[in-house]
Amino acid sequence: MTRFIEHLVEPQRLLLFWQARESKKRSRYRVGQLVMKGGQVALQYDHGPEMAEAKQMGFEGYPAFPLKQVEHSHQVMEAFKRRLPPRSRGDFSRYLELRALPADAEISDFALLGYSGAKLPNDGFELVHPFDDPPEAFEVLLEVAGFRHEAELDASELNKGDSVQFVPEPENPVDAQAIRMESALRKLGYVPRGHLDMLHRMLDQGAALDGEVFRINGSLERPLVYVLTRIRLDDRPAMPANVFRIQA
């Protein structure tokens, strides 16, 4: 039986990331956020070294919202909703299910942007739900970052429902915040950068993480693996034996 996200969390903001597709490392940068203000959505660009590096890698702002203006509030939600399929589309329920959301989920467009990532094939943008005020138990669907280059097994060796563990790598030479994802003690790849702050924040609060392979797709040359990840604080009922409990 396919398991889906059970605890929907309505966000008050979404983080905006941009991937520099021309860089050798295909680096991701946090470049701004969408903030809900009195029922309206504003786009706020970030400052600081990360934005400066993104600009060096060619970031020019989100289309129609120039960087010279730090905050935009005119038709921001309308612009970002174009990254979602229309709800009237016949296969919209399938769109939800592929993102681990029940076909009958009652979810706002703003929340759907965060839960789906709202990625398009060619522009490098992604939205991330930060789960600023989460319940004691919630779920998020994570794409395994770096599977093509980092995995110690082929996608054909994975099955839907396979257990996935999360292992912090504080000695990682690239990113001390890195969290490795593995199955049966074999490396799959890493937690996507945009979700690291949230997961470390949960771990600092004593959370337990467990995951399972939700979906495998893509192509033979570029396989994509998605993991349904459940996050629970320690004062929840005892976890099943296969839950891997980690500390940051």
Image: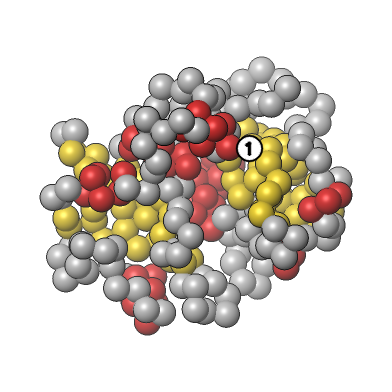
Going 66% across and 17% down the picture, which residue do you hit?
Answer: 237
Which residue in the rendered view is the most extreme toward the front? 90
Instruction: Locate the N terminus by quadrant.
Output: top right
Q: Depth check: give the residue in front, 229 or 61.
A: 61
Amino acid, disc 1 = Thr
Residue 180 position, x and y percent, is 70, 55
Q: Is residue 214 above or below residue 3?
A: below
Residue 129: in sight, yes or no? no
Q: Is residue 145 left or right of residue 57?
A: right
Determine the image quadrant of residue 187.
bottom right
Kindly identify which residue carries mark 1.
229
Along the viewing direction, whichever of 68 and 197 lies nearer the viewer = 68
Circle 1: element type: strand
- Position of residue 138 measured from the top left corner of the image (x, y, whole percent): 54, 29
Residue 110 to residue 31: above or below: above
Pick the front one: 92 or 72: 92
Across and down, in percent, residue 154 comes to: 83, 57
Residue closest to the far top: 237
Label 1: few (<14), some or many (≥20) within 10 Å? many
Residue in the image at 59% along x and 67% along y: 175
Residue 151 lies in quadrant: bottom right
For image coordinates 86% across by 45% down, the residue present is 184
Q: Identify the residue at image location x=46%, y=26%.
A: 8
Q: Position of residue 205 (x, y in %)?
A: 54, 37
Q: Is residue 141 visible?
A: yes
Note whether 148 is above or below 202 in the view shown. below
